[in-house]
Image: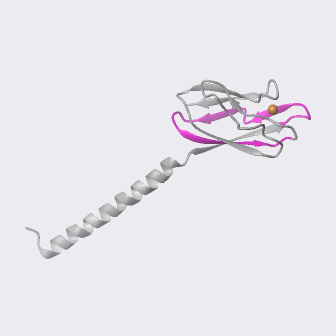
């Protein structure tokens, strides 16, 4: 049977360990609930030629991501992630505006995205 000091010491250890566990769980859940940020921009090569920058986005598989698409041109664009991801910006993204797509990445592979306003404007989402 531990002494009174022994009990005090043991209860102190229990409180410290429990506090560390609570902090770890709260910090962990916060970290898990925040999607990984990804950024994509529409850029102009000329008044009529546009491209995505970067043209190749890389993300880990099976991860919640928040893809921010900013239109840095004077023309409207869309961002369409082709099937099997099959997601699109809610509206045509007007000049200097931003849209955000939140989704969970699929398994490893290369997935195409395009702007369906400008033929040939596209890129690859590489899932590792
Ligand atoms: Cu476009």
**Nearest the eye: 79 or 19:** 79
Placement of the C terminus among the 4 image quadrants: top right
Furthest residue to the front?
A: 91
Residue 81 falls in image quadrant: top right
Query: What span is colored magenta in the figure?
Result: 44-73
Residue in the picture at 11% in, 73% down: 3
Residue in the picture at 62% in, 30% down: 126
| Horizontal and vertical percent position of residue 30 | 49, 53
Vertical relation: 22 (above or below) 9: above
Q: Regarding ligand 1, which quadrant of the image does it lie in?
A: top right
| Horizontal and vertical percent position of residue 51 | 80, 32
**Nearest the eye: 101 or 44:** 101
In the displayed structure, does residue 11 sit left or right of residue 45? left
Residue in the picture at 31% in, 61% down: 18
| Image mark count | 0
Residue in the picture at 54% in, 40% down: 64
Furthest residue to the right?
A: 47
Placement of the N terminus among the 4 image quadrants: bottom left
| Residue 54 lies in the magenta-colored region | yes
| Residue 6 lies in the magenta-colored region | no
Furthest residue to the bottom?
A: 4
| Horizontal and vertical percent position of residue 82 | 66, 26
In the displayed structure, does residue 48 sit left or right of residue 55? right
| Horizontal and vertical percent position of residue 15 | 29, 66
Residue 101 falls in image quadrant: top right
Report the coloring of the rendering: one colour
**Nearest the eye: 103 or 20:** 103
């Amino acid at each position: 049977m531990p002494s009174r000091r022994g009990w005090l010491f043991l209860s102190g250890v229990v409180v410290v360990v429990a506090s560390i566990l609570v902090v770890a769980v709260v910090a962990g859940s916060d970290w898990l609930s925040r999607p990984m940020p990804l950024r994509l921009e529409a850029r102009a090569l000329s008044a009529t030629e546009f491209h995505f920058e970067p043209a190749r986005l890389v993300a880990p598989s099976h991860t919640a991501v928040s893809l921010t698409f900013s239109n840095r041109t004077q023309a409207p664009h869309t961002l369409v992630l082709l099937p099997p991801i099959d997601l699109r910006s809610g509206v045509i993204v007007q000049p200097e505006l931003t849209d955000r797509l939140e989704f969970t990445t699929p398994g490893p592979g290369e997935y195409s995205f395009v702007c369906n306003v400008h033929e040939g404007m596209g890129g690859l989402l590489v899932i590792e």
